[in-house]
Every structure is written in structure tokens, then in C-alpha cells.
Amino acid sequence: MAKRHPSFVCQECGAVYNRWKGKCEACGGWNSIVEETGAASPMSGPVATRPSRAKGRIFPLEGLSGETKEAPRTPSGIAELDRVTGGGFVHGSVILLGGDPGIGKSTLLMQASAALAKRGERVAYISGEEAVAQVRLRAERLGLGQAPVELASETNVEDIIATLSQGRPPALAIIDSIQTMWTETVESAPGTVTQVRGSAQSLIRFAKTSGTAVILVGHVTKDGQIAGPRVVEHMVDAVVSFEGDTGHHFRIMRAVKNRFGPTDEIGVFEMSDQGLREVPNPSELFLAGRDMATPGTAVFAGMEGTRPLLVEIQALVAPSSLGTPRRAVVGWDQSRLSMVLAVLEAHGGLKLGMHDVYLNVAGGLRITEPAADLAAAAALISSLSGNALPPDTVYFGELGLSGAIRPVAQEQARLKEAAKLGFSSAISPQPRLDKSKGSKSERLPLATSAIGHITDLVANIAVRRRKAS
């Protein structure tokens, strides 16, 4: 028997060492390195017992030109889920779904599997955390007890693959969760990096050979990262995160990686008594209940992939009694807020050095695009001056370090969404000159005030204050 050598593996990033260390050099984590004993490699042992491979197998090489076919997909029956995945589940693909505990991952997968099974597709739901009776109780609570979904409670990967290989290959197989799976080829406890990597590799091999779309559910650590080795994210075809605040009733799904579709689309769901309900128009949900007469609020016309999205940005600027004023932000980048504050002081003439600044994206949504700079600046100016912004106006534009307002993409889609929700005006950057269209200008769906510098925005709000007084 081949000698088995112990290795020391970091449980946070998967780095391997030949001896124990208190701190991982790869990710910087403390006390995350655990000793693991891996099984012998199938090719290990005496040289005489190995198969002879003196010459490699010659395989054909093809060029870039040739016939291409779009990957066959199976629609899930849930429009928001299909939007994120790019139109449905690709045959033979593997999707890693991560989210906080209790966010609704199992509920969403149960609804998707029931929708597929009702269309005559074979769907298998393998739970490693719950018994079959517990999964049935959830299905009955969602009104899906009669859906022909195949259920099992199993954690051995070899047994799962052998069972799913019987009969017609499933169109969808759900593994909930990958951290509870274990394979006989690895001598480690379930949940360790070696077991997660080995189990995922076996399930991916089954998906590629059988054509079954496999969804692996992954736990999420306290900092929002999917638990387990980062190499699993490189092995799968798509990584989807299911986000949401427990204090709000809606959930957001976004693709972090997708080999067969876009990575900038989002799906919005609302949690109800009957499970997750699709939200076809998220802007109405994020703007519901906003206070239009309060200073420090501005509506941002953003884009998430191809979907325009209107959200409210709230700011509070208050005098500080501390030597170092507070800077707190929720739903936006902290560095981006510091940059906007610096530009407002350097080029806008505002004195914010002795004020506490709080910024919040209402509804729990997280914004990443730089087009929110103008809306954040407008909310900060409004809060500092005590003047409420017009409730029927939206803001979007990127703020440069020189104070210039830079144009952003997809202006027409943002304005059309604002007009559809009843907004009558927009504050936006100067539009780009498109030489291909000549002197013809496209008609805008609502009145637009184009500004080129941050001083124009400060002056605009100051003029409104004088008129109000």
C-alpha cells in the first residue's frame, strides 16, 4: 500500500502546507490550518504496476472557425432565475449557489425543482442536512406537495452518483449542501477543504458525462464569502449569490461568475407566506414608502445589467463633537464616499470636515456602479443645506476628481424607467457627442438638466433654497 503523507490545509482558502502554521500566508487567516490525511493517488505505487504510457495519445486540433451551436438550456419556469442564469440551466453545467442561512435558498430551489418536475422533467433533490420528511413539510407549506420531485437524504457522493445514474438522466440535480457531502476517496471529515474539493470534483464529472444540470448549495461565512476552498468556484460553471437583509422581505440574486450567460444581471424576489414571489418591477418596491419632503434623500436611476433600477439614496450630515468625525455607509463603497466628500470640499466649496456623514441605500440593495456619485452628492448637499430635493427628479452621473460630471452608459434606459414611474425631470451629465448620428438628437422621455461640474449641482440646490425662503 502506498504511504499516505499528512498535509496541512487552510480551511478558508485551500492553501496546502507541509507543516502546521498559525497564520496562513495565502489569505492571512489565523488558526485556519488543519491537518488532513489524503488517500493514496490511483497512480501511486510501484512503477511496475502502473499502466504503460510511453507515448501520449494523439488528439485532433481544430481551428477557431467552424460551426457553433448555442448551449442547450432547460428553462426553470421562474423568470427571475432564468434572467440571472442567462435563459435557463445549461445541460451538464454546475452552478454553485451561496447565501446566508435562512435567506431562502432551499425555498427557491424547491420552487424551481417543482416547476421543472411538473413539466415532465426528472428532478432529484438530495439533502444532506434535512431528512426526507422535513423536505416534504417545506414542500407542503409552499403548496408543492404533489410535485413529482425525487427526494433523498444522503451524504455519500458515490451512492448519490450511482443512484442518479439509474434510468433516465435527471434534467436537474440539487445537492444541499456541498459542505455535508463526503467521498470515499478522501480520508477527511465532511466539510473540510479536501472533502469539499473531492466531492465537488466527482459531482462535476457526473454532470459533464450525463448532461445533468447540478446545483451545489454552499454555506456562507460571516464576511459573506462562500465557505470552502476558492478552487471550487473555479471548477464550477456559474457562481450565484442569494443576498438579502433579514429586516426586509425581498431577496436579490446575482451571478458572480457565469460561463454561459451574463454576470451583471440580477433577479429580485419577495418573501411571502407562499414562498418566494417574483418582482417584475423592482423600482416600485425599492421606492415604496419614501419620504419626499425630507432633506438628504435623492433617487438614483441605476442599471443592473440590462435592467434599469431606481433606488433611494439617503444621507445625513450632522455636526460632530468628536475630533475625528464618523463616516458610515451602508450599501455603497466606503472609498467612493470618501472620494465624493473630498471633491465636494475641494471643488464644491462645502465644509464637511467637522460633520458626521452617514449614507444609506434604502431597501438593503448594494450599488457598485460609479453612476451613483451624482445622486450621493446631491443627497449630501441636501442634508447639509437642509433643503429637500424635488421629489419628481432622478440623478445619475459619475463624479471625477476634478469635479467634472462624466457621462454614463445607457442613459435612455434610465430615463425611460424614471418616466414610467412618474418622474418628470432628471439631473444628468452632458451627453456624449455621437458623430455617427450626426446632428440629430434622440428625443428624451422626460426633461433633462445636463450639468458639467459639481459646482453646478451645488448652485442648483442653493438657488432652490433661496426660492423656498
Image: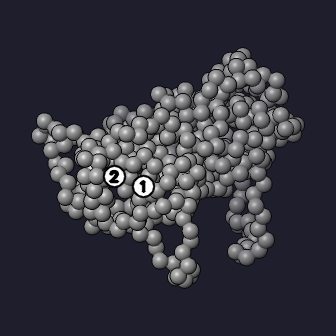
Residue 431, visible in the rendered structure: yes
Using residue 289 as the reference point, say whether residue 451 is left or right of it: left
Residue 188, visible in the rendered structure: no
Using residue 438 as the reference point, say whether residue 384 is left or right of it: left
Q: Quadrant of residue 179?
A: top right
| In this view, 413 is above or below 171 | below
- Reading the image, the residue beneath label 1 is 395
Give whichever of discs 1 and 2 has the lower sequence position: 2
- Cα–Cα gap, marks 1 and 2: 8 Å
- The count of marks equals 2
Instruction: Characterize the local packing of mark 2: few (<14), some (14-19) or many (20 or more) Cα atoms within 10 angstroms.
Output: many
Mark 2: which amino acid? Ala
Element class at badge 2: helix
Residue at (73% x, 65% y) in the render:
57
Residue 203 percent coordinates (x, y): 68, 41
The quadrant in which the N terminus is found is top right
Q: Which mark is residue 185?
A: none
Between 67 and 445, the residue placed more toward the observer is 445
User: Do tag 1 and tag 2 residues touch (Cβ < 8 Å)?
Assistant: yes
- Reading the image, the residue beneath label 2 is 378
Between 242 and 227, the residue placed more toward the observer is 242
Mark 1: which amino acid? Tyr
Residue 61 percent coordinates (x, y): 72, 73
Residue at (74% x, 34% y) in the render:
113
